[in-house]
Image (spheres, helix red, strand yellow):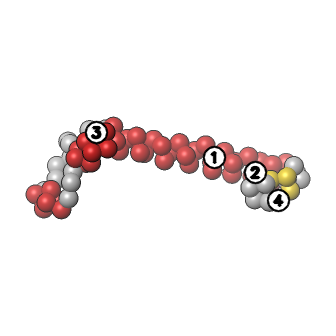
Amino acid sequence: MFDPLYEEIVTNTSDLMVYMVQHFVMELILPLSIFVSVMLTLFVDWNWIPISSIERERGPSLQDVKKRIFE
């Protein structure tokens, strides 16, 4: 079996298992974790975290950014 991503030939069972694990992680777990982290950032109410007045002056809050994105 030829692996076009890494340009290698998979010839034995151990190489095949490494190939399957690499592709499982790179093509399924990594994109799903990125997607879940973005969705958590956008859809979870983070207002329960107290912030100081200095942090408020530094820039827009997450709520302001969400309003701009969804408007």
- The local secondary structure at tag 4 comes to strand
Amino acid carrying label 2: it is Tyr
Amino acid carrying label 4: it is Glu
In this figure, which residue is indicated by the disc labeled 3?
Answer: 71
- Asked whether the residues under the numbered discs 2 and 3 touch, taking CB atoms below 8 Å apart as contact, a structural biologist would say no
Q: Residue at x 55, y 46 (%)?
A: 31
Instruction: Give the residue at the far right of this rendering.
Output: 11
Judge from the rendering whether residue 49 lies leftward or rightward of residue 39; answer left or right. Answer: left
- The local secondary structure at tag 2 comes to helix
Number of the front mark, 3 or 1: 3
Amino acid carrying label 3: it is Glu
Q: Residue at x 75, y 59 (%)?
A: 6
Instruction: State which quarter of the image contains the C terminus.
Output: top left
The percent position of residue 42, horizontal first and vertical second, equals 34, 42
The percent position of residue 59, horizontal first and vertical second, equals 20, 59
- Asked whether the residues under the numbered discs 4 and 3 touch, taking CB atoms below 8 Å apart as contact, a structural biologist would say no
Comes first in the chain, label 4 or label 1: 4
In this figure, which residue is indicated by the disc labeled 2?
Answer: 19
Check residue 27 in the rendering and tell me which mark sits there, or answer none.
1
Amino acid carrying label 1: it is Glu
Check residue 8 in the rendering and tell me which mark sits there, or answer none.
4
